[in-house]
Every structure is written in structure tokens, then in C-alpha cells.
Image: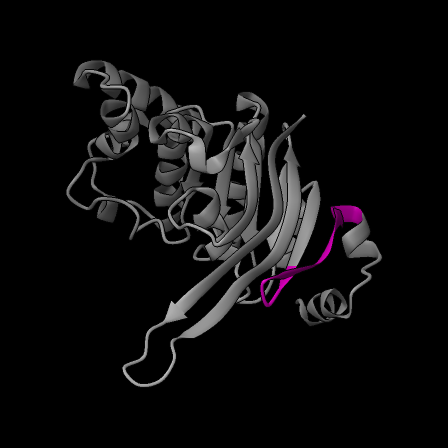
Amino acid sequence: MNLLSVKNLNKSYVTKKLMGKNEERKVLSNVQFELGENKILGIVGESGCGKSTLAKVLTRLEDFQSGEITLCGQNLREIPQKNLTHLVQMVFQDPYQSLNPRKMAWEIIADPIMVVEKTPRPQAKIQALAMMAKVGLLPELSERYPHQFSGGQRQRIGIARALMLKPKILILDEPVSALDVSIQAQVLNLLLDLQKEFGLSMIFISHDLSVVKHISDETLVLYFGEVVEHGPSENVFKNPQHAYTKTLLESAP
């Protein structure tokens, strides 16, 4: 069963001008793909190709002009916000900017259940500490603030927070690009472990082909907002069909 189905998705930004006509810039053009249960879809492409915009559309941070997005059998636009937070969550590229600097680690992680589910603070802290253990953070770190953690630890906090509402789908927007290579490997292996433990489906967005090859079941290549290649990762990397995919692979270190 497919948890997510995207058909003919189109998204544009309009730039308003004081003089003359407003300019329309198309960011996503007829994008189509599906995401199955317990699968990881890697989305690759250069900066500005529409990867992050797609993530924002799928989490309803931004709207789209035309097309159809079905999430767990429901039209994305018709899902109540509270229900949506239990279906899909996002982990952002910069863990420092996405964490509240005035809150302790456990409070950041517990926020979703305290806000959405109205879980009392004492119970929320217990659940947050349990989740910290699952992402490899010691409980004695729970009362530290974001600036007291390393980049890899901060990203673990972001992942823990995203998992608190037990979503079906986790969208990861360049989650390891700001980390050292050795830390990247640790976070990627953690994500694979969490996927098995929680039965997650993931959309993993990256410009790093080696990372996507390591983690994803299927790979989708975006070029100026259009899908130019999509298939099992092994096929895409071993036998790329589109010239742009070949160029990406040739230029990868």
C-alpha cells in the first residue's frame, strides 16, 4: 500500500513588481511519485531544483497551484492539522536554527505531545527521556540547552522531536549536510535503525548522491523542478538513463 501519492504537482512563486506585470517562476512542474510503507525515497538534485519546496508542500507549510497529493488515502488539503501532525513530520537541515535556544533538550523533544496531545509536563518529560535514549542521547543531557550540544547531537534532538507523535512518514531535508562525514554516518545508521523500530517511511532529500545511495530504496532526480529520473536506487546509480543524472554521478566525489 502506498502511504503517499503525488500526481501532476505544480508549484509557482509570483514576484510582484511595482512596474509591469508580475513574474511567475515555476518551481515544481508535473511532479509525480509514490511512497510505500517502510520505504525510503531519496530525492536528489542541485540547489534550487525544488527539493525543499517539495518538502514544504508535503508538510503543508506551503500550498500548491495544481495537482493531487494523497496521504494515507486522504486528500492532503482536507486533513485536519492535528491529524496531519500524526501522519507526517519533518527534520530540518540546520538543527541549530530549528531548535528553540531558550528551551532545554527534553522540553524541545516533548513540545509536540504537550502542544498537540496536551500531555502533562511530568508525563511528557518521561516520554521525552525515553525518546532521547532511542536516538542515542544520555538522560543526563536532558536539561542542557541547544548551544551546549554538538551538531550531531542537535540533529538527534530534532529527530527525537519529530518522532514524538509517531508519524507514518518522516521527511528529512538535507539532515546531514551540515555535519562532519564521520557524524553523518552515525546519523544515517541511526535513521535506518529507527525506520525498522518505528516502521517508518521516509523521504530523504539531499544533494549528496553517496548519502542517498546508502540510505534509499528508490531515488528520484529533480532537475529545475521536473522529475527526470525515478526508480530503484540500484538501477538509478548503476544504469542512469538521463543525461543530468549521469552528470551528477560523474561530478560526485
Q: In front here: 195 or 88?
A: 88
Seen as rendered, the residue at the extreme left is 102
Would you place residue 148 above or below residue 206 in this image? Answer: above
- The quadrant in which residue 236 appears is bottom right
Image position, residue 15 (x, y; %): 37, 72
Residue located 46% across and 28% down the image: 87
Query: Which quarter of the rendered picture does the C terminus lie within?
Result: bottom right
Residue 51 magenta: no
**What is the residue that sits farthest to the front in this orientation?**
21
Residue 230 among magenta residues? yes
Name, please, the residue furthest toward the right. Answer: 239
- Name the residue located 57 percent from the left edge and 67 percent from the top edge: 46
Tell me which residue sits at (60%, 62%) in the image: 45
Where's residue 159, x and y in %? 41, 37
Q: Which residues are magenta?
A: 222-234
User: Splitting the image into 4 quarters, where does residue 60 fall?
Assistant: top left
